[in-house]
Structures are given as structure tokens and as C-alpha cells.
Amino acid sequence: MRNTDPISSLISPVKQSILAATYGQPEKWWYMRELAAFAGRTPSSLQRELKAMTSSGLLRTRRDASRHYFKAETDSPLYEPLRLLIERTTGIQEGLKLALEPLADKIDAAFIYGSVARRDDTVKSDVDLIVIGNIGLADMAPELRRLEKRFRREFNVKCYSSDEFTSKIKTNNHFVSSILKEDKIFLIGNDDVLEKFGG
């Protein structure tokens, strides 16, 4: 049984986040604090990796006043293979994070489950997603369609209000109970949030 995500044995989590941001949006210049927020880390924790990735030709850099900006080095011979690798792995996760970010004030928790979370998916596997909060599928549909086209994967999304999700836990709904025991990749919230619903 495979317990380790293959990309994690090749690329550190910090580099994965930097590549997911810069190679996921190669036309965009990212300043350090913006990259840190995307990665969920402090700017100082990114400095060494950014310097190494710039020196190795994976990233371009420029300075504007006191800000350092970074973007993908699209002329690098490694650009296309790395872009494809990131897009097929962490790219889906980070793409969904960006898509849900504008709706975050309506969402209590959102997570990927199923084969993608277990790391045993294939390029033909659906991406299974649960979103809990004051939100409906129609709110997310435009961004989800864009991501489906980008990743060539179908997104299977289930939306629950907070009360509905709590009710399903209390009544031991088979589907929800089984999902709570599975591996999850959180996009918004964490296990502590789910525990507040009774999970």
C-alpha cells in the first residue's frame, strides 16, 4: 500500500506550494507576502527556497521599491514538465483553494476526499469535494467548470448547510459517517471545525 505522496518524496512541501502558485499562473508576478499567504506560511520561511529556485533558473525575480516579485521562468527547459507534474498533483488542490477563496466567508469547511485524498487516483478519476456552509453548487459552478476544463477532470461536489451536515452526523448517515473516517485534503477549515459539527 502506498502511504507517501510520490511528489512529496521529490519536492518539499514549501517548493510544491511555490510551484503550484507560480507555475499554476505563469503570467503572474507574485510578491513574497502573497506567496506566503498562498502557501500558508511566513515570508521568512520561503526566502531560502525562493533564492534557490531563482538561482537554479526555475523562477524569475524582480524588485519594485521594497518588494521582491517572483514568477515562473517559462524559458526553462524544466518549465513544461514541472508545470504538468504540479498540475496533475498539487495543482488541483491549489486551484480549488483559489476558486473557493472569494467565497470563504460563506464556507465553514471544504475538503477533497476519495481517491485524490488517498493519493491513488488516476488521470481519469473524479475529484470528490464536500463543501459545508451557506453556499450552493450554483455559487461555485463557473469556477468549477473552468477547473474541469483546465485539469481535464470531472469534479463531484456535494454541498451541505451546517445544520444539514450536523444532522447527518447525529443520525449516523452512512455516507457522511464513512467520509469522516477517510483521508481528507482540507481547502478551508480543518478537523477541529468538523468536530464542532459532531464529527
Image (cartoon, helix red, strand yellow):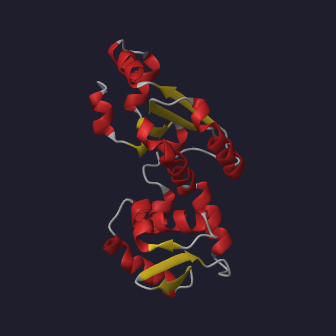
Residue lying at 44% horizontally and 85% vertically, measured from the top left = 65
Q: Quadrant of residue 183?
A: top left
Say if residue 123 shows up in the picture: no
Horizontally, residue 176 falls left or right of residue 72, namely left
Residue 147 place in picture, x, y as percent: 65, 48
The quarter of the image holding the C terminus is: top left
Query: Image height check: is 101 above or below 40?
Result: above
Residue lying at 32% horizontally and 67% vertically, measured from the top left = 42
Foreground of the two, 115 or 19: 19
In the rendered image, the residue lying farthest to the top is 171
Residue 84 place in picture, x, y as percent: 65, 63
Q: Quadrant of residue 127?
A: top right
Say if residue 25 shows up in the picture: yes
Query: Image height check: is 6 above or below 141?
Result: below
Residue 5 place in picture, x, y as percent: 47, 54
Residue lying at 53% horizontally and 62% vertically, measured from the top left = 20
Query: Image height check: is 98 above or below 111?
Result: below
Residue 31 place in picture, x, y as percent: 46, 73
Q: Quadrant of residue 29?
A: bottom right
Foreground of the two, 140 or 73: 140
Residue lying at 52% horizontally and 83% vertically, measured from the top left = 61
Q: In the rendered picture of this protein, how many numbered marks are placed on residues? A: 0
Foreground of the two, 101 or 110: 101
